[in-house]
Image (spheres, rainbow, N blue to C red):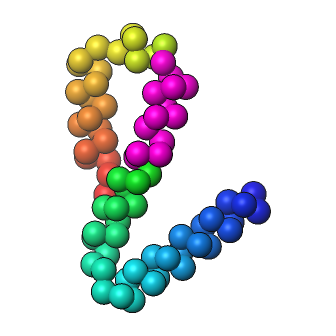
C-alpha cells in the first residue's frame, strides 16, 4: 500500500509539472489512458486466456461499444 501511495504521489507531481510546462490537459489524459491500456492489456490477456477462447465477435462488439460509451 505504501508503494502505491508513492507511485500515485509521483504521478501527481509529474502531471503537475507537465501541465505547468504547457501540455494541454486532454493530451495528458490521452497519454495516461494509452499507457494504462498498454500496461493492463497484456496482463488481462495472460490471466484470462481461457475466456478469450469462448468469446465470439458479437460479444467483442458489445464490449467495444460499452467501452466507447462508458469512458468519459
Q: Give the mark count.
A: 0
Q: Majority secondary structure of the magenta segment?
A: helix
| In this picture, residue 33 sits left or right of residue 2 | left
Q: Is residue 58 above or below residue 26?
A: above
Q: Is residue 68 magenta?
A: no
Identity of the residue drawn at 28% across and 69% down: 27
Q: Residue furthest top?
A: 54
Identity of the residue drawn at 46% across and 34% down: 42
Task: Quarter of the image for the N terminus: give it.
Answer: bottom right
Identity of the residue drawn at 53% across and 75% down: 12
Task: Quarter of the image for the C terminus: give it.
Answer: bottom left
How far from the left and from the top, in percent, is residue 59? 29, 21
| In this picture, residue 36 sits left or right of residue 64 | right
Identity of the residue drawn at 35% across and 53% down: 34
Residue 61 quadrant: top left
How far from the left and from the top, in percent, is residue 23? 30, 80
Range of magenta residues = 37-49
Q: Is residue 25 above or below residue 4?
A: below
Amino acid at each position: 500500500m505504501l508503494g502505491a501511495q508513492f507511485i500515485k504521489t509521483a504521478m501527481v507531481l509529474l502531471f503537475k509539472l507537465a501541465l505547468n510546462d504547457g501540455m494541454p490537459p486532454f493530451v495528458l489524459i490521452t497519454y495516461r489512458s494509452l499507457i494504462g491500456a498498454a500496461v493492463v492489456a497484456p496482463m488481462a490477456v495472460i490471466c484470462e486466456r481461457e475466456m478469450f477462447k469462448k468469446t465470439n465477435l458479437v460479444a467483442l462488439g458489445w464490449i467495444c461499444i460499452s467501452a466507447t460509451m462508458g469512458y468519459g
